[in-house]
Amino acid sequence: MLQLDALIRAVEDSKRLVFFGGAGVSTESGLKDYRSKNGIYETARNYGRPPEEILSHDCLMEEPELFYRFFRDYFLGNASPNVTHRVLAALESPQRRVSIVTQNIDGLHQMAGSTRVYELHGSASRYACIGCGKRFPRGFVIESKINVPKCDRCGAMIRPLVTMYGEMLDDDVVTGAVTEISRADLLIIGGTSLAVYPAASFVRCFRGDTLAIINRDPTPYDDRCGIVLHDTLGHVFTALAKALSLPV
C-alpha cells in the first residue's frame, strides 16, 4: 500500500511523465504477451516455428503466407483500450505533459486518446505497398479476400509498418522517445520484463526524480526503482484513477 501511495503522490507532483510500456499493458484488452505461460511463445507452437522467425523480414519476404497467417491470428483482432490506456490518456493536461513510449504495435494508446505516443516497433494500424509505396489502413488488410494483401494500384504485396526482427528501429521515433525519457521527472515502467533490446536500454537515459515499475513478476530493474509494484496494471491504474478522480 505504501508503494501505491508513493506512486499516486509522484503522479500528482509530476509535470513531465513518461510511461514506458510492453506487451503486459494490453493483456487486459485480451491480447497476448510474449513470455508468460499463456503468451505468444507458448501458444504459437502449432506454427512449427518460433515467433521471432515468423515475425522477421526474411519470413515476410520469403514466406508471406506463413507470416500473414500468424500476423492475422495475433495482431488483427478487435481489442479495445483497457483502464491503463484510458487513465494514461486522462492524465494529460495543460499542467502535465504525458508521453507514451511503447513496444506494442496495437495502437490502443491512440484509441484511448493519448496524443504523444512513440511506437518503437511501429503499428499494425499502418501498411504500405512494397512496390509503389502506397499507404493503406488496417481495415483494407482485414477486409482483403486473400491472406496476403496486394496493392490495388500495382499488385505488389502490402506489408505492415512494424519493425520486424532483422530490421532497424525508426531513428526519429527512437530520438523522440529518448528525448522524452531524458527530460521526464517521473518514469513509469509497466507490463514489460525489460528483456527486449535495444528498447529496454532507453530506461538508462532517465535523469528525473522518480523511477517506478509495475509488473507482475520481478525485473532486472527492480533494485534501481524508487517505487516497485508487483501487481497488475489494471489494479494499479484503477486505484490511481480513483485517487485522482479521473474520468475513465
Image (cartoon, grey):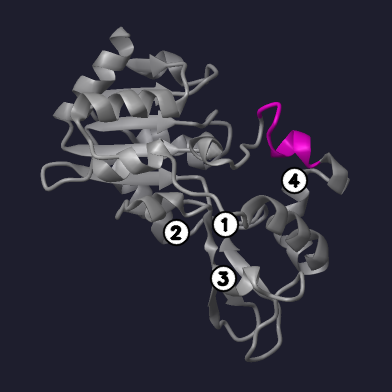
- Per the rendering, the mark at residue 171 is 2
Q: Which residue is mark 1?
A: 168
- Residue shown at 44%/31% (left/top)? 190
Q: Please tell me whether mark 1 or mark 3 is closer to you in this view.
A: 3
Return the x and y of residue 205 as percentages of the image width and height. 35, 36
Q: Please tell me whether mark 1 or mark 4 is closer to you in this view.
A: 4
Contact between labelled residues 3 and 2, with CB atoms less than 8 Å apart: no
Quarter where residue 227 is shown: top left
Q: Which residue is mark 3?
A: 139
Quadrant (top left, top right, bottom left, bottom right) of the N terminus = top left
SS under mark 1 = loop
Quadrant (top left, top right, bottom left, bottom right) of the C terminus = top left
Return the x and y of residue 6 as percentages of the image width and height. 25, 16
In the picture, measured across the screen, residue 46 lies left or right of residue 100, that is: right
Quarter where residue 61 is shown: bottom right
Contact between labelled residues 2 and 1, with CB atoms less than 8 Å apart: yes
- Per the rendering, the mark at residue 59 is none
